[in-house]
Image (cartoon, rainbow, N blue to C red):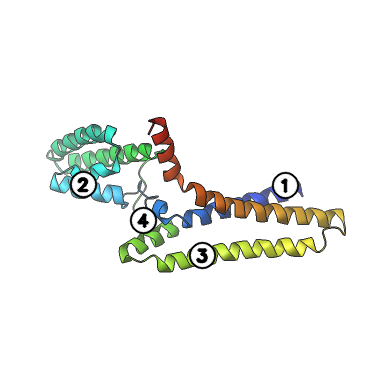
C-alpha cells in the first residue's frame, strides 16, 4: 500500500510538472535549443553562411560574446579547407554556442540532439509563435488544467464520503487528498517560479549581484 501510494503521488507530481511546462510557452519555446533544428543552431547556420556573427550573439550573455566571436572566426577559417573540414567546423561551433547558451541559462548541456527531437508541447508552442496566435494553445492548456484538477477533486470528494468507515477507507481518502493538494501545489509553483530557463537566469543574475 505504501509503495502504491508513493508511486501514485510521484505520478501526480510528474503530471503537474508536465502541465506546468505547458503553462509557460515563453520558456517552452526554447526548450529545444539543443537540437540541430532548434532556433539556436538554425540561426548559427545562417550566420556562418553570411559570415556575420552579430545575429547569434543574443543567445549568449555579454561576458561570453568574445568567446563566441573567437570560435566563429576559427570556424569560418576551417570551413574553407574542404567539405569534411566544413562539417566538422560547423558542428564544433554549434556545440560551443549551444553549450555556452545553456550555461548562461543555468541549464545543463548534454550534447546536441538530432533534428526532429522536439516534444509535442514544444512543437505546439512554436506553432503558436509562427502563426502569431496563442489562442488555441492557451485554450488547450486551460482545458487540460481544469480537467486535471476536477478529476483529482472528484476522487477526493468520493473518498471523503467513506473516510470514517474503516482504516483502509481513511487511507484511501488521505491518498486522494495528498494527490489533489500536490497536483494543485505543483501547478501553482510552476506558475510562480516559471520553467528551468527562468530559474537558471534568476540564479545567474543573483550570482552577479544584479
Q: Of label 1 and label 4, which has the lower sequence position? A: 1
Q: Which residue is under mark 1?
A: 3
Residue 200 shows in the view:
yes
**Residue 12 visible in the displayed image:** no
**Residue in view at x 60 percent, y 51 percent:** 185
Label whose residue precedes the other's in the sequence (2 or 1): 1
Q: For mark 4, what is the residue?
A: 116
Q: Alpha-carbon distance for marks 1 and 4?
A: 37 Å
The label shown at residue 142 is 3
Q: Closer to the N terminus: mark 2 or mark 3?
A: 2
Secondary element at tag 2: helix
Q: Position of residue 3 (x, y in %)?
A: 72, 47
Q: Residue at x 77, y 61 (%)?
A: 159
Marks 1 and 2: in contact by CB < 8 Å? no
Q: Secondary structure at mark 1?
A: helix
User: Which image quadrant for residue 122?
Assistant: bottom left
Q: Disc 2 marks which residue?
A: 55
- Say what secondary structure mark 4 lies in: loop
Mark 4 vs mark 3, foreground winner is: 3
In the image, which is nearer the foreground, mark 2 or mark 3? 3
For discs 2 and 4, the disc positioned in front in the rendered view: 2
- In the image, is 191 to the left or to the right of 156? left
Q: Residue furthest top?
A: 208
Amino acid at each position: 500500500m505504501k509503495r502504491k501510494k508513493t508511486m501514485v503521488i510521484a505520478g501526480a507530481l510528474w503530471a503537474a510538472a508536465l502541465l506546468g511546462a505547458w503553462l509557460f510557452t515563453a520558456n517552452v519555446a526554447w526548450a529545444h535549443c539543443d537540437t540541430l533544428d532548434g532556433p539556436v543552431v538554425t540561426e548559427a547556420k545562417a550566420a556562418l553562411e553570411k559570415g556575420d556573427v552579430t545575429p547569434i550573439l543574443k543567445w549568449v550573455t555579454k561576458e561570453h560574446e568574445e568567446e563566441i566571436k573567437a570560435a566563429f572566426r576559427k570556424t569560418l577559417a576551417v570551413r574553407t579547407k574542404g567539405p569534411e573540414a566544413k562539417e566538422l567546423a560547423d558542428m564544433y561551433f554549434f556545440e560551443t554556442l549551444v553549450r555556452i547558451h545553456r550555461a548562461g541559462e543555468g541549464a545543463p548541456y548534454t550534447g546536441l540532439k538530432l533534428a526532429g527531437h522536439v516534444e509535442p508541447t514544444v512543437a505546439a508552442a512554436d506553432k503558436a509563435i509562427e502563426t502569431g496566435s496563442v489562442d488555441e494553445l492557451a485554450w488547450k492548456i486551460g482545458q487540460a488544467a481544469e480537467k486535471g484538477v476536477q478529476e483529482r477533486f472528484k476522487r477526493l470528494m468520493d473518498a471523503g464520503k467513506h473516510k470514517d468507515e474503516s482504516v483502509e477507507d481513511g487511507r484511501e481518502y488521505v491518498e486522494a487528498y495528498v494527490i489533489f493538494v500536490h497536483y494543485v501545489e505543483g501547478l501553482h509553483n510552476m506558475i510562480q517560479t516559471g520553467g528551468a530557463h527562468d530559474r537558471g537566469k534568476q540564479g545567474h543574475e543573483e550570482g552577479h549581484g544584479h
